[in-house]
Amino acid sequence: MNHWIIFPVILPAMFAPVMAMAMRHDLLLQRVFSIAGTVAMMMISIGLFISTLDGSIEVYTLGNWEAPFGIVLVLDRLSATMLVLSSLLAFGVVLYAIGSSWDSRGRHFHPLFAFQMMGVNGAFLTGDAFNLFVFFEVLLIASYGLMIHAGGAMRLRSGLQYVVMNLVGSTLFLFAMGTLYAVLGTLNMADMAVKARGLAPGDQGLLLVGAMLLLIVFSIKAAAFPVQFWLPATYSNAAPPVAALFAIMTKVGAYAIIRVYTLIFGADTVGTVFTDLLLPVALVTLCVGAIGVLGSRQLPRQVSFAVLASMGTLLLAISLDTEQATTAALYYMVHSTFAAGAMFVILDMIRQSQGNTEQAPGGLVTSLFFVAAIAMAGMPPLSGFVGKLLILDASRTDAWMPWIWAVILVTSLMTIVGFALRGSRYMWKPLDPNFTFPENLDEEGLPIAAARIPGLAVTAACIPLGLLVVLTILAGPVAEMMRETAVQLRDTAGYITAVLGPQGGS
Amino acid sequence: MELLMAILIGLQTAGGLYLVMRRRTFSVIVGTALMTYAVNLFLFASGRLAFNMPPIYSKYAEGYTDPLPQALVLTAIVISFGMTAVAVMIALGAYLESDTDHIDMRRDPMDLDPDEIAPEDDDFYMPGLQRPKGDHG
């Protein structure tokens, strides 16, 4: 048994209490520990990712209890990809939080960050549905703390909305678990897949109810229409590094949808009920996001809606449910995580660069925003374009193809126009050409230059951007890797055999 | 017994849902608490209702009751307890910071009339951030 599989979960779980208890008054020590932990997590994730490249599925039985009686962690290509994705994003975010001193504006940023990573990694690794619920709660309770990091009335109020929304979501998750346990008699995901295939026809209705409840829960996480309302207020009010980290949170929902609705409620169990439902939902989400991008008056809100639009695109690709579409979905998922992460930290740099003045931010920040906006809107040459191209290509044979193409292309245009509009207002339009605003002048009456951004913060913001460039250059090999992941994902028998053993799959 | 349980859970969920839809944070939190109670009962019932049965298989007993839902309920109770505590703390913080216990993000917290449309406000103070810069249009 490969014990490294549990490390992405227990490493942050061990670091967080140490940082919260032993180092609570020493920010420097916390920073060192936090970076060390994130780097270690990144190394382990990459190592695990390399170990899955041969197509093997590794199972870690906790306490050596055999599945389906004990809880298992399952490492396959998809889990490993998500682990690498989350740890790379976390590295950029934690460096930015340190570089911009956001971690010193409230207490316990680093312990909460570690707990959040524990929940996210656990959700990606677990092979047990109830354990998925527990890891969801771990990442949520850490995210509540992070959401209200640095305080402020509006941040607390939007944090409260976020908490209530997710409390209701958690309750629904438990209802779904109870229903599914009552009908299937197991909560091990591989075992659930076996039992769902051999279900008596009379129990099919109950299974569908449980699956539907679960879809609503994951949709809340993934911010799909009509349960997307929490996202803009939450993302635009959270501290910027936290908003950047939250880019992975919606992807947890998307991951759960991919995992559960290919493995347990796939086309061979319940037919295409859920994918048929998800497609219009995704299209509406995409439209809502794009309209929001066009209509927002402030950049943070606009970027939040752009995240919503990218979730719509992602869910669209997931709902097509073909090998090619899943490949496109996975590629786009990686892209949109980094793009959203980069965008939120760059927004913060814009604000820092302006300081208390009313003038345009510095040139470096402006150009970074330009690059990130291109990525986010899905314009060539960056990976957003490649991702959307893959999705368009995958939907070519679908019955909904005219709708899908029309919505994706029109919303892309809307996003581009929205970013161009807001971007030129913020960066180019001379608000104060003759320097008449007193806040733009120092004591001697000279114009104040744009504030300098700490080098570490700029470097940190360049990490997700650099990864986007790498993703674009290596689009071919990455897409091929994602294709193999999609093939493995659709081979549910392989997963079930890996978890339950050869006789369990029958 | 099953009917009674089902009605009870249904009533509790309905009450919780109604309270969650309210505008004041206190009733919303009570509503979420009520819903978690309902879901705990529901989870408990998902392993079938059995009387006076040991939670483990034994050849001396006539039958057994499923122990797994009981373990799940324990986990759910602990988690929902913690979550409710966090929600109360955040609600209290929001109330003390903004002098209002309304859950929606209305611009003027003192404006209690839900139907009145807030006047268009050009430089609405961006929550938790400084005023948005460079955007006067």
Image (tube, rainbow, N blue to C red):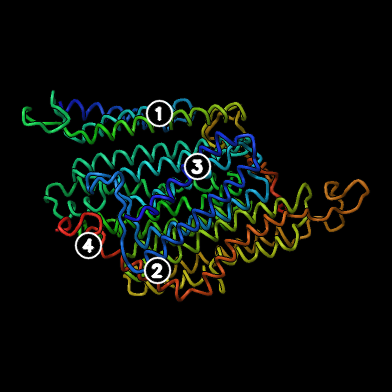
Q: Residues within 10 Å of mark 3 (few under 14, many from 20)?
A: many
Comparing marks 4 and 3, which lies closer to the viewer? 4
Same chain letter for marks 3 and 2:
yes
Q: Dot 3: what SS?
A: helix
Disc 1: host chain: B
Disc 2: host chain: A
Residue A327 on image: x %, y %: 38, 68
Hey, what amino acid is under mark 2? Met
Residue occupied by mark 4? A493
Residue nearest the observer in this picture, A470 or A70 = A70
Residue A414 on image: x %, y %: 55, 64
Q: Earlier in the sequence, mark 4 or mark 3?
A: 3
Could you tell me how far apart the alpha carbons at marks 3 and 1 are, in whole angstroms?
17 Å
Q: Which part of the image, by quadrant, shows the N terminus of chain A?
A: bottom left
Hey, what amino acid is under mark 1? Phe
Residue occupied by mark 3? A143
